[in-house]
Amino acid sequence: MPQTFPSATYTMTQEKIRLGKMLFNEKRVSIDGTTSCAKCHPFSYYGADNLEKSRGNFGKINPRNAPTVLNAAGQMSQHWRGDRKDVEEQAKKALLGKASFGAPSYEWVEKRLGSIPKYEELFKKAFVNDKNPISVDNYAEAIGAWERTLSTPSRFDEFLEGRSNALTQEEKAGLKTFMDKGCTSCHSGALLGGTMLQKFGVVSPYWEYTKSKKIDAGRYNVTKKEEDKYLFKVPQLRNVAMTAPYFHDGSVKSLRDAIKIMAKVQLGADLSQKETQNIYLFLQALSGKLSEDIVTLPILPQTN
């Protein structure tokens, strides 16, 4: 598990990270003055929000469940449909999102930030070579720099590094079941997911088991390609025990139920109660400790 998730496109500096942490919590760039990145990704709920679907500006309901922002920068793309290439693009486009920040334009956002004197100073320090440092691109890059530090190693990493007693016997049994059943064919890599798009409901229609209120066609709604129907990004499993409810629509509250549903609709497997419990216990071991920096709120600049 890497300590940070660096980018080949963007540089990470302490000045950008500090500014990005503040902007992550900044509400004044939303149309209603109450919406920030932290509204849908509070760390009190491990970077998710414990809702089926998030509430954006003026309480508008987002179309999908908010995944955790922890470790998100290490994934292949962002959003359930994989339609944001990285955390920087996600931060920028969320500003204009009708059910997120709802800003009328990027220029409006830049004007709002420029009206707060302290931000002018902080943007200049973070983007020293820019003639006009306060821009939405730099806003997004700074938030991305902060989010690229949100790594949460767990006992599972200690186990992978050779400390065999880092996991209990039950958790080890759960890991074995997890691998033997074929879960790792999709939940792979350092984050146990986030590396590919996959059809939700390979064996059976997912909604028959999730009891979803609405059938979401996933990536098909982006590409209009028939082969992309019900395709979603495979979610990472890091901190999954802390980020209920589950799936793209938050339709399942119980992690044990989510485990059984995934086995059924993806693999055609009916897990026994013992197998389900063992996998459940293994997934608990993927919960990492949040650093002091993650849980400490920044003091934001005052409006003059």
Image (cartoon, grey):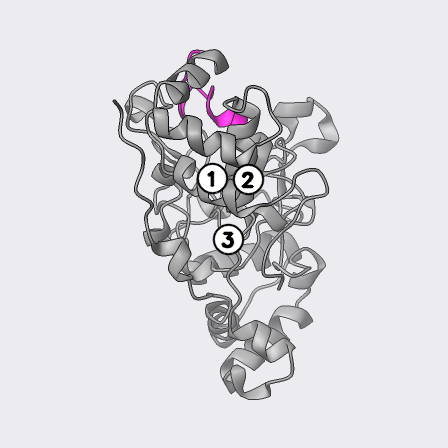
Instruction: Relative to 39, say whether 178 is above or below.
Output: below
Query: Could you tell me the amino acid type at mark 2?
Result: Gly
Residue 22 position, x and y percent, is 39, 39
Residue 239 x/y as whole percent:
47, 60
Nearer to us of marks 2 and 1 is 1
Q: In this view, does 142 lie to the left or right of 213?
A: right
> Which quadrant holds the N terminus?
bottom right
Residue positioned 50% across, 69% down in the render? 276
- On the picture, is 196 further left or further right than 119? right
Q: Mark 2–mark 1 contact, CB under 8 Å?
A: yes
- Of the pair 77 and 22, the residue shown nearer to us: 22
Mark 2 vs mark 1: which is more N-terminal? 1
Question: Label 3: which residue?
Answer: 150
- Whether 255 is drawn above or below 86: the answer is below
Q: Mark 1 points at which residue?
A: 20
Residue flagged by tag 3: what amino acid is it? Leu
Which residue occupies the foreground of this view, 265 or 61?
61
Residue 45 x/y as whole percent:
35, 52
Query: Magenta region: which residues?
Result: 92-104
Kind of element beneath mark 3: loop
Q: Which of marks 3 and 2 is nearer the N terminus?
A: 2
